[in-house]
């Protein structure tokens, strides 16, 4: 405010009073109370620290992270990187972090999609659809997540065994050993096509920018979608075709007591993912609904009066304004999903909490184990916060 | 001149413009897409409802015979999931609700739960929002403590290890909020304070707690708190978990309260200063009454979150409602009837949380009445 007013009186600071050593001086009182509080907190921490070090000495527990290099000897059912029980604790914990990220990243994507759909359904003019969405949101949000996870896990375990497995589609098998999906046998051609596809995205983005810049210059709108289709679909397919078009699918087949081949989704991971996605989607739906409702109806009407098409109204007028309301609560929902993935320990999915807990029990290094859990989550939380804050700042309303 | 009779009075609108037909036309069948959605949803809904009725009522078994070896659940197993086995609830509901509390003394935890509910209802009525309410809370919580522990008034003593089920859930939630709420107000004020040291401490506390999952705090309570205390001093597991929940709830509630403090117009602060009020007079008489009133709906939503989050104590082995439910199906005779048990436990949580969320919405509408045109 002071920058915009030219009145010199606003720029003048009040004169500095000398500090009087008297109780009636506000600043003296402030300094006194700060010293009292800091001393109290400091002595509490010192008391806890001295108790802890004494207790550790009595129990002959060595502190430090030296145990990370020792052999873990704990079996882990599923991991993204190669892991043997003979590997170190450090590697075991890395597997845990990756497992947490695996469920968090896929969970965030799926929950956003499902939550947005339900939020839009809640606003639908169709009475039945909006009521069903409303009932879903209410029930899902009023039940503890842990209960829901246990419920899903019980249902998955109650499925028939591999021999009587459910087969809703060709190659998709659902049994008490989890979900099996057909897998594409990955070859170089696929990698090449994927790389070309990613390059196509960048190319489309660049072309879109250029087209907009030209439109700004001469006022002629240019179609972006033919180029986009060419770069992102036709070119990768052509590359794949040119390299021999390999297309071999591996189906899960029953061997002995279990299925072999294909993609395996373990019952623990599947239950955790269903539970987290359906639960968080209930919250995201409310966020999306509130965001869309926050856009004034006059904005729709004004945009239509300008002659914009329905899609353009949504894309250029409504969504940018709704996103501003949606992003901050959406961020906290993403953070909640990530933190809630720690409930995996209750159903036996080996995420970071579960593995750190086992480590802690095997080695007796309680403080280090819990410190590791906290540092991992703080890092993930801060990274998501930073990214979403950056995105939020980008789309925020630019004011004077 | 003309003999066409002019109808007297206004004509009725056509039947397709008013009444249920018009309602269905605008709300269910307004276009081909809407019609398709209605038909698909209606079909799914009816199909789901029918299969649920089949499972929960038609094919369900309500009780099973029992002999010397215990309950005979073969009839339930023969259903193979086609029907619910509500016999498990009939057999185990006392265990799920009250845990291992002495069987003939179950009226005591039951009465304690009733007292909790009475306390919630009293606290929800706006005309009771006076400082005397704090006395009611202290009185009620003391009465609940006496009921649960016993040892006086002719009640036999029941050690805390034998408590379980619903009372534990209600104790964790209620005591958690009773202590976390004052803590959160202090922290929120501290975060808005102009004294840098206090501000930094409060920011650190809130951000650290909010950055980690509740489970890690509960693990900390169960394995690290014993190391924090001097030798020989020990506090029991329930109290340790309670402390973790208070610390956790305090950080989240503090952010809600801070929202209220920030939303209050600056003029209120300045006017209070101009009146010559001291910091605590200003805060207690001017700021907090207005700021807290603004954040009541989000506060209630946070309370619902906590009520649900108390179920996480399952992971460190405290016997709350959900743990009792999970333990009830460990017994071989009842293994595999998890769905029925979770539906029962879920229904209890649903009743409490739905009541709170309904109340919160009513209150929000009530408090915002002056803003509506």
Image: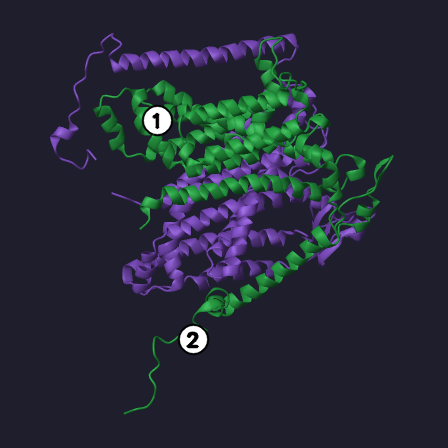
Chain colours: A purple, B green
User: What number is the disc on residue B192?
Assistant: 1
Residue name at image x 75 percent, y 38 percent: B91
- Is residue B360 visible in the rendered structure shown here? yes
**In the rendered view, does B199 fall on the left or right side of A248?**
left
Residue A66 coordinates in the image, percent (x, y): 62, 18
**Neighbourhood count class around disc 1 (C-alpha, 10 Å): few under 14, some 14–19, many 20 upward:** some
**Which residue lies under the disc numbered 2?**
B14
Task: Check chain identity for marks 2 and 1: say if they share one.
Answer: yes
- Disc 2 is placed on an element classified as loop
Q: Please tell me in which quadrant of the rendered image residue A302 appears.
A: bottom left
Query: Is disc 2 in contact with disc 1, using a CB cutoff of under 8 Å?
Result: no
Residue A227 coordinates in the image, percent (x, y): 45, 62
Q: Which residue is at the front of the view, A274 or B90?
A: B90
Instruction: Tell which tag, 2 or 1, sits nearer the viewer.
Output: 2
Q: Earlier in the sequence, mark 2 or mark 1?
A: 2
Is residue B356 depicted above or below A60 in this figure?
below
Q: Which residue is at the front of the view, A34 or A75?
A: A34
Residue name at image x 27 percent, y 44 percent: A399
Question: What is the spatial separation of the Cα atoms under label 2 and label 1, in whole angstroms?
Answer: 63 Å
Is residue A130 depicted above or below A274 in this figure?
below
Residue B236 coordinates in the image, percent (x, y): 62, 18
Q: Quadrant of the C terminus of chain A?
A: top left
Q: Please tell me in which quadrant of the rendered image residue B116 appears.
A: top right
Is residue A272 depicted above or below A165 in this figure?
above
Pointer 1 indicates a residue of which chain? Answer: B
- Disc 1 is placed on an element classified as loop
Q: Quadrant of the N terminus of chain A?
A: top left
Q: Which residue is at the front of the view, B230 or B138?
A: B138
Residue B266 coordinates in the image, percent (x, y): 26, 32
């Amino acid at each position: 405010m002071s920058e915009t007013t030219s009145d010199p009186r606003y720029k003048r600071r009040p004169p500095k009073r000398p500090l009087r050593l008297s109780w009636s001086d506000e600043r003296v009182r402030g300094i006194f109370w700060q010293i009292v509080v800091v001393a109290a907190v400091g002595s509490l921490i010192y008391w806890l620290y001295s108790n802890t070090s004494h207790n550790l000495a009595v129990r002959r527990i060595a502190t430090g992270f030296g145990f990370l290099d020792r052999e873990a000897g704990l079996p882990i059912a599923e991991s993204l990187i190669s892991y043997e029980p003979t590997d170190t604790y450090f590697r075991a914990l890395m597997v845990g972090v990756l497992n947490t990220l695996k469920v968090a990243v896929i969970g965030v994507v799926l929950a956003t999609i499902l939550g947005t759909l339900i939020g839009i359904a809640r606003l639908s003019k169709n009475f039945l659809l909006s009521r069903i969405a409303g009932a879903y949101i209410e029930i899902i949000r009023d039940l503890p997540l842990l209960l829901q996870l246990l419920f899903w896990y019980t249902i998955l375990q109650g499925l028939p065994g591999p021999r009587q497995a459910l087969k809703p589609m060709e190659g998709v098998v659902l049994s008490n050993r989890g979900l099996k999906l057909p897998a594409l046998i990955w070859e170089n051609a696929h990698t090449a096509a994927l790389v070309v596809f990613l390059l196509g995205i960048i190319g489309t983005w660049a072309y879109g920018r250029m087209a907009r810049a030209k439109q700004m210059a001469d006022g002629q709108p240019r179609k972006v979608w033919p180029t986009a289709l060419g770069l992102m679909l036709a070119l990768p397919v052509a590359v794949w075709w040119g390299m021999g078009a390999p297309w071999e699918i591996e189906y899960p087949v029953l061997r002995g007591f279990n299925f072999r081949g294909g993609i395996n989704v373990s019952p623990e991971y599947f239950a955790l993912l269903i539970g987290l996605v359906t639960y968080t989607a209930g919250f995201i739906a409310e966020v999306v609904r509130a965001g869309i409702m926050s856009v004034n109806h006059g904005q729709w009407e004004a945009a239509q009066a300008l002659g914009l098409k329905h899609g353009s109204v949504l894309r250029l007028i409504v969504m940018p304004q709704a996103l501003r309301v949606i992003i901050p609560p959406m961020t906290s929902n993403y953070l909640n999903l990530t933190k809630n993935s720690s409930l995996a320990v209750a159903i036996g999915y080996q995420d970071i909490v579960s593995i750190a807990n086992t480590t802690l029990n095997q080695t007796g290094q309680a403080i280090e184990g819990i410190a590791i859990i906290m540092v991992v989550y703080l890092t993930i939380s801060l990274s998501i916060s930073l990214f979403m804050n950056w995105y939020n700042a980008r789309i925020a309303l630019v004011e004077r | 001149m003309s003999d066409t009779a002019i109808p007297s009075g206004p004509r009725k609108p056509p039947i397709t413009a008013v009444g249920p037909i018009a309602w269905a036309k605008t709300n269910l069948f307004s276009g081909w897409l809407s019609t398709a959605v209605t038909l698909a949803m209606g079909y799914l809904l009816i199909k789901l409802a029918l299969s649920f009725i089949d499972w929960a009522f038609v094919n369900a078994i309500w009780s099973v015979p029992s002999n010397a070896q215990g309950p005979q659940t073969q009839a339930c197993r023969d259903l193979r999931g086609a029907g619910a086995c509500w016999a498990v609830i009939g057999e185990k509901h006392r265990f799920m609700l009250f845990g291992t509390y002495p069987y003939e003394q179950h009226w005591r935890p039951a009465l304690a739960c009733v007292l909790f509910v009475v306390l919630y209802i009293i606290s929800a009525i706006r005309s009771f929002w006076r400082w005397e309410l704090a006395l009611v809370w202290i009185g009620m919580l003391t009465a609940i403590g006496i009921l649960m522990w016993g040892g006086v008034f002719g009640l036999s003593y029941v050690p805390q290890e034998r408590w379980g089920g619903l009372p534990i859930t209600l104790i964790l939630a209620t005591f958690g909020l009773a202590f976390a709420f004052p803590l959160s107000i202090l922290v929120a004020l501290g975060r808005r304070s102009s004294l840098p040291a206090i501000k930094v401490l409060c920011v650190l506390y809130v951000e650290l707690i909010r950055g980690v999952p509740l489970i890690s705090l509960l693990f900390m309570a169960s394995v690290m708190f014993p190391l924090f205390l001097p030798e020989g001093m020990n506090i029991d597991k329930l109290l340790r978990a309670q402390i973790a929940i208070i610390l956790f709830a305090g950080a989240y509630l503090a952010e809600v309260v801070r929202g209220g403090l920030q939303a209050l117009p600056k003029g209120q602060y300045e006017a209070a200063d101009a009146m010559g009020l001291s910091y605590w007079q200003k805060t207690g008489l001017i700021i907090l009454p207005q700021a807290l009133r603004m954040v009541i709906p989000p506060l209630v939503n946070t309370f619902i979150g906590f009520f649900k989050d108390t179920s996480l104590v399952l992971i460190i082995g405290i016997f709350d409602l959900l743990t009792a439910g999970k333990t009830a199906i460990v017994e071989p005779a009842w293994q595999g009837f998890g769905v029925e048990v979770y539906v029962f436990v879920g229904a209890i949580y649903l009743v409490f949380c739905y009541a709170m969320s309904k109340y919160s919405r009513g209150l929000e509408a009530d408090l915002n009445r002056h803003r509506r045109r």
